[in-house]
Image (cartoon, grey):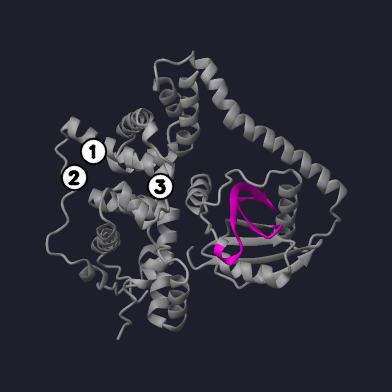
Amino acid sequence: MAHDDRKRRFELLALPHLDAAFNLARWLAGNSADAEDVVQDAYLRAYRYFDSFHGGEFRVWLLSIVRNCFLDWVKDNRSGRLLFQPEPAGEADDMLWSERPRDPESLLLDSIDSQTLEQLMLRLPIEYREVLLLREVEDLSYKEIAVIVNTPLGTTMSRLARARLALRKLWLDAHPSEPAHGL
Amino acid sequence: MACDRSATLPALLADGAFRQPRRFLAERHVGRCPDCAMALDERHAAKTMLRTKLPFHRAPPGLAARIGAALPRETPPVVARRRGLSQTFAGGLASGTIGALAGVAATLLAVLPLGAPDAAVQGAIDSHIRSLMADHLTDVATSDQHTVKPWLSARLDVSPPVRDMADLGFPLVGGRLDYVAGHKGAAVVYRHAKHVINVFAWAAPGSDTGFAERAHQGFNVVSWRRGGIAYCAVSDLEPDQLAAFARLASGPAS
């Protein structure tokens, strides 16, 4: 049956990325129960629009649907969370790039434990959190990340740079007595 | 005064944003510029830290089945569908594993002489032979580094560099999970002409080392340690070719 074929093809393509989808949803939603709802919704939606997938990296296509489902989920649940604030106006991209960290990141982050790191990540604005995850954990290219977060390439790149600085800053603020330099 | 490229160039390089020949030019600059070299080291360290310490939330066990059951209504009974699925995934894996084990037994008994030079090197050679004999070269067969790497990272506590180096004559073939001398680790598979190269990687805390080259049982082996991961590249390539390959495979995008 045609339906069987379609479903089977979909499962072959989509199920291997279930962990990636769940991880992203879990980081966005902040808890497992909501992440499950988001992922399940995303898979159903992906299946519905499966015919509009025309090759390319399936994971990128799927993750962008996960993200959209998360946005819809937030809207439906009226959680009151403020999400995806617009980029700060007037903040030139190259200004950010030129802000060269003065402390070696390696030393700075060496002593951090997983739990603290997770806390810091969850305190980051969600648009920073997602680009960090997509880049460092999913190992996606700038271009792929830009597709998923539906943002121009240049903005995506500077957002990633900004996210890295923000994570450093959170860590420094949390540990004022442990300046990383001089370690 | 700091190099004005050190704010952007190392990050772009570490993120794999350059294609050849720009990557070559960027790497050459970093090789000559202490500011950029330091910034690149920091970026790699930060990336490694995030990859190793950031919790990866795997999907709960029942989620795949729930999604499958919810998919379309106009489908045959769930049982039939699930049998199809498990044949595809689990069945394929299981028969691969049995094949691999049979291959190991036969290979170890028939071919390998006793007296290992080094447990890790010997283990790597064993795994290399096993991968060729049992025809179980890859669990994930694709030249797309963006598929192989996350696939491995999601299943292991190490995240070795995976790069398609087809432009340098070493196309990526895929990756698989493997055991090397008792370590659970990754095998990243490359090809050079007809030669298969297995790069084994497993967690090995300790400081970075240089490249050690050895020949054993007709295979050449290059091993090194970087960022808390031990690597062993095994192939029947010529020693100097394998040495060159190891240096390419080891970085800078770790």
Give whichever of discs 2 and 1 has the lower sequence position: 1
Based on the picture, tell me whether residue A131 belongs to the magenta stretch: no
Q: Residue B4, percent across and down?
A: 30, 80
Mark 3: give few (<14), some (14-19) or many (20+) Cα within 10 Å. Answer: some
Based on the picture, tell me whether residue B189 belongs to the magenta stretch: yes
Dots 2, 1 in contact, CB < 8 A: yes
Residue at the outermost left position = A89
Going by the image, does B80 lie left or right of B243? left
Mark 2: give few (<14), some (14-19) or many (20+) Cα within 10 Å. Answer: few
Badge 2 and badge 1 both on one subunit: yes
Report the span colored magenta: B167-195
Displayed quadrant of residue A33? top left
Q: What residue is disc 2 on?
A: A83
Q: Residue B157, percent across and down?
A: 51, 50
Which is more foreground, mark 2 or mark 1?
Answer: 1
Name the residue rendered at 36%, 72% in the picture.
B9
Q: What residue is disc 3 on?
A: B55
Q: CA distance from mark 3 to mark 2?
A: 22 Å
Q: Amino acid at mark 3?
A: Pro
Q: CA distance from mark 2 to mark 1?
A: 9 Å
Going by the image, does B169 lie left or right of B132? left
Q: What residue is disc 1 on?
A: A71
Which is more foreground, mark 3 or mark 2?
Answer: 2
Q: Chain of mark 1?
A: A
Badge 3 and badge 2 both on one subunit: no
Q: CA distance from mark 1 to mark 3?
A: 22 Å
Badge 1 and badge 3 both on one subunit: no
